[in-house]
Amino acid sequence: MIGAAASYIAGLFFASFFMGAIPFLIIAAFAAIIGILNKFSKYDYILISVSFVLAVTVSTCYTHFRYDNVTSYSGKTADFSGEVIEHREYSADKASYVLKGELGGMKNVRVVVYCDDLNVRYGDIISFNNCVFSGIDGDYLTDSMDYFRSERVFLSIESYQNADIEHTGTRKLRNAIIDYRERIVSEFRMTLGEDAGAFLSGLVFGRKQGMDDEILTSFYRCGIGHVLAVSGLHVSIIAIALMSLLRLLKVNRFIAFGLMDALLIMLILMADSPVSAIRAAIMMNFAYSAHLFRRRTDALNSLSAALLLICLVNPYAVYSSGLILSAAGTFGISVYAPYLTGKFPTKGLHWRFARAFCTMLCTTVCIMPFTMKFFDETSLISPLVNVFIVPLCSIVMVIGVLYVITGGLISLLGIAGALVEIILDVSHNISQVWAFYFSSRSEKAAEYAIALIAVVALVRIIFVKRRYTAAATAAACAMVFISSAVSGFRFNNQFTVAVLGRRHNAAVVVSYHGKTQIIDLSGHYKSAEYVKKYLAENGINTAEFLVLTKNNQSQYAAYEKKLESVDVGNIVTVGDTPVIGGDSEAVPHDSDWELYDDKFAMNYSSGVLTVNYGEAHTAIIPIKSEFTDGHEDGLNVFFGTGIENESNTDDTVYKSSINGTDNFEITLKESGRYRIRRL
């Protein structure tokens, strides 16, 4: 099972990410080494080869006959009618819907649309007339492409003429479960308060909507953000608690197994069916069914079988960050940690603590390359925090689940609230210590860390012994930390100008020698989110100036909220309009603004920001300004509407998602040279 599953999943990854001669040779060499050292028979080699080729064939065919055919409608106009299979509400009466319908003779085509809240339920039919379809593209802020691809959603409706709604009254059970969840979420928040209630909702249902950004940041910096995603931890605790109770009540083991599955299905539906929870539920079924029929099973076999089942149903599941993180964490806690701690004594409190700490450490090491890839910051103190905080989270989770399954008849929310306050306080205080986490810097660092996993695996395969594997793991971690430190040192000694924001919007972050200036040029409400991500990705915790040039009041509030964990020295608003609220004082300034330093100078005038560093000059210019032909010698960056069809030249950059320069970083040299890197 392990060999077939591993080779099949390797084939899917190869077809999805690494297609080429060199990756194939590396995979083949790796498989050959494993086979030689483990004395595989010819039938083993045949099974592995067939599984790999089958996976590549399935993925390639799915891409050609399904993905390519659906995405061929990008840029086209057609009518579309589909059933609502997923929906989420946002602020300002906005919502997103995933619809499943027929398009061009293809059945079960899934599309996503962002629009006004249409007040529909699961199972209702929405018919859009004259839809303009577009492919789903990634963005510096969110990797929508991979997320929706893993959900088999390949198109979005960019615009439409009108929408007709048919309330079908179907999917009654699903709608009833969602209504019940929303009622419970509301009760959590009313009883415990906004922050504690939102945390408990995230813990039980995996719903992070409404949680304060600073609280979320503190959880990820502490390494406990995984408790807010319904996965193996949740499924294990809930299943073990229920089965233990039913065993005490001497319930028939077959009935108990059915009750466990029913509870897990209900909670997974309440959490919107995340693939990580489905993976955990499948593994739990393997574990308990083996016990049910007096058979033995092991974690690696169960994990392999669960991943194989998921990927057989959906070959694009390999794009899911949730599945990758869940699988890596499960491997760390149930396979890698037991292997490395296998010789630890079982008696003594100190040895129990050592085993628990090493288990968390092994889990952290296994998921670290992927947290570096998917998140902006990676926790260094995660193993220690998890040893003490996860048990508290588990108690709170059990209290929340008990409240859910009894409809509030058994309520221990007072105890849960007290524990949540402890968790929030501890995580907040730990997250303020910069030495406890490090920034991912770039995807290259994550790819480097993933390559080191293969090296550690190779050491384990060749040398077998624990001490060699542990030494290789420690060396790999040291190399990751050193490379991150070197990247940080290089960044701090470069003069960089980052131009951020979606399409025609622009916010600029200028960094040099530990000094950072933030200038918002377009006044768009989401600009603060792009700035926050860039600062976190590069380990920037302080900013000398935040300059607001448009929509000062709303932008002031947006930046105050998003940059809570960043120490902003001075806030300057261009113009005489004062701003109200917030903890920092905003200083009004004239329409022109300038800042000088020993090495560089910045100037804002007539909507144009100029940055000069030695002989290098850069101007960030609205496309509709009087400086459309360029501002001065050097690099001219244009942003605004109406530039999608423009092409970049040596001294001109048009900020546009069409030409690949939606978010980018300019590194300036004193000599006048510059380098542009897309973010």
Image (cartoon, helix red, strand yellow):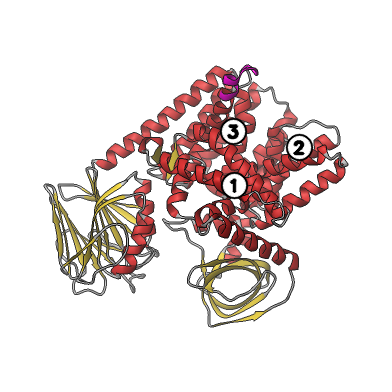
Reply above or below: 352 against 22. above
User: Extreme right residue here?
Assistant: 252
| Residue density around tag 1, few if under 14, some if 14–19, many if 20 or more, within 10 Å | many
Question: Does the rendering let one see residue 523?
Answer: no
**Magenta span has 349?**
yes
Residue 520 is tagged as none
User: Extreme front residue here?
Assistant: 414
Q: Earlier in the sequence, mark 1 or mark 3?
A: 3
Residue on which disc 1 sits: 416
Question: Does the rendering let one see residue 395?
Answer: yes
Residue on which disc 2 sits: 287
Q: Where on the picture, by quarter, is residue 63?
A: bottom right
| Residue density around tag 3, few if under 14, some if 14–19, many if 20 or more, within 10 Å | many
Residue for point 68% across, 41% down = 237
Q: Earlier in the sequence, mark 2 or mark 3?
A: 2
Q: Which residues are magenta?
A: 345-353
Q: Amino acid at mark 3?
A: Gly
Q: Where on the picture, by quarter, is residue 521?
A: bottom left
Q: Is residue 349 left or right of residue 489?
A: right
Q: Amino acid at mark 1?
A: Ala
Q: Are marks 2 and 3 in contact (CB under 8 Å)?
A: no
Residue for point 39% across, 44% down = 442
Residue 130 at x, y percent in the picture: 55, 81
- Estimate the spatial distance between the alpha carbons at disc 2 and disc 3, rounded to whole Å: 18 Å
Residue for point 37% across, 47% down = 536
Q: Amino acid at mark 2?
A: Ala
**Magenta span has 522?**
no
Viewer-nearest residue: 67 or 99: 99
Query: Please, what secondary structure does the residue beneath circle 2 have?
Result: helix
Residue 332 is tagged as 3
Q: Earlier in the sequence, mark 1 or mark 2?
A: 2
